Image (cartoon, rainbow, N blue to C red):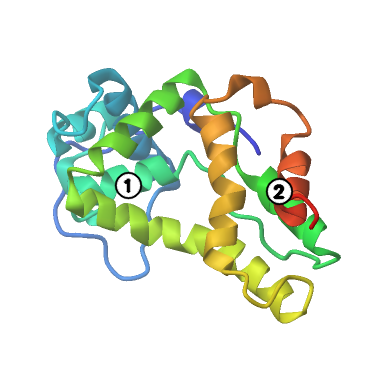
Amino acid sequence: MTTSPRDHAEPATEPATEAAPPGPGRPRSEAVTRAILDAVLDLIAEQGSIASISMDAVAARSGTSKATVYRRWGSKEELVAAAVESIKAPPASNLPHLSVRDDLIRIGKAVRTDVSAKERRILKCIMIESDANPELRTHQERLMARRREAGIEVFRYWRDQGALRPDVDPELAAAQLVSPLLTIMVYGHYPSLRAPDLVERLVDQLLEGISAPR
């Protein structure tokens, strides 16, 4: 995965006040959108909490207006969820279906693991605060559902092809693949397992199972 460009992005500027929302068909500036998302991430990293972050602070940090922020996101929680999602990589797509193992390795390698220490602090903060913030959790789940479905669909595909046991739960299997990668490579647990071949080892153990032969 490639590193997010936000660490090198220059803040975009807009007039301090704006009138009516843009008319139909008027494109939104990607630079302004990126500046707003970057501002949110910087504020979370600095404050260590989203509770102390205001839309006014986001607008000031990004060099935009509060009206500009609200035209893109309807609430602070929706904005925070979008900002956190922006530091993740897109899910693997257009898988060739050469084999179960090949597809799962492609999914595993599509998980972004080159997160910085700053991004790791942000992810840990959001993980904790989403438990106490139902609106934030709802927006996160909506965004994560699309990402999860890509993995679930692969297990469902190979189950239907007869390459997996017919009683395999695709959703549980997808969680068994991705969750360890996040735990080890993103959240920094089990440091002894961090290795270039982690994805391959994880996929092989998942496919082979861990029960001793009867």
Query: Dot 2 surroundings within 10 Å: few (below 14), some, or many (20 or more)?
Result: few
- Looking at the rendered structure, which numbered label has been put on residue 199? none
Q: Is residue 109 visible?
A: yes
State the CA–CA distance, disc 2 to disc 1: 36 Å
Q: Quadrant of residue 131?
A: top left
Where residue 128 appears, as percent x and y from the top left, is: 28, 35
Of 188 and 169, nearer the camera is: 169
Q: Amino acid at mark 2?
A: Ile
Whether label 2 touches label 1, CB < 8 Å: no
Apparent side of residue 198 relative to residue 50 in the rendered image (left or right): right
Where residue 190 appears, as percent x and y from the top left, is: 57, 24
For disc 1, the marked residue is: 81
Of 73 and 157, nearer the camera is: 157
Q: Quadrant of residue 138?
A: bottom left
Question: Which is more N-terminal, label 1 or label 2?
Answer: 1
Q: Is residue 27 visible?
A: no
Residue 161's place in the image compared with 182, above or below, is: below
Q: Residue at x 71, y 48 (%)?
A: 210
Where residue 149 appears, as percent x and y from the top left, is: 53, 65
Query: Dot 1 surroundings within 10 Å: few (below 14), some, or many (20 or more)?
Result: many
Mark 2 falls on what kind of element?
loop
Q: State the residue lying farthest toward the right.
A: 98
Q: Residue at x 36, y 61 (%)?
A: 142
Apparent side of residue 130 relative to residue 17 in the rendered image (left or right): right
For disc 2, the marked residue is: 210
Mark 1 falls on what kind of element?
helix
- Tell me how many marks there are: 2
Considering the image in quadrants, where does the N terminus appear?
top right
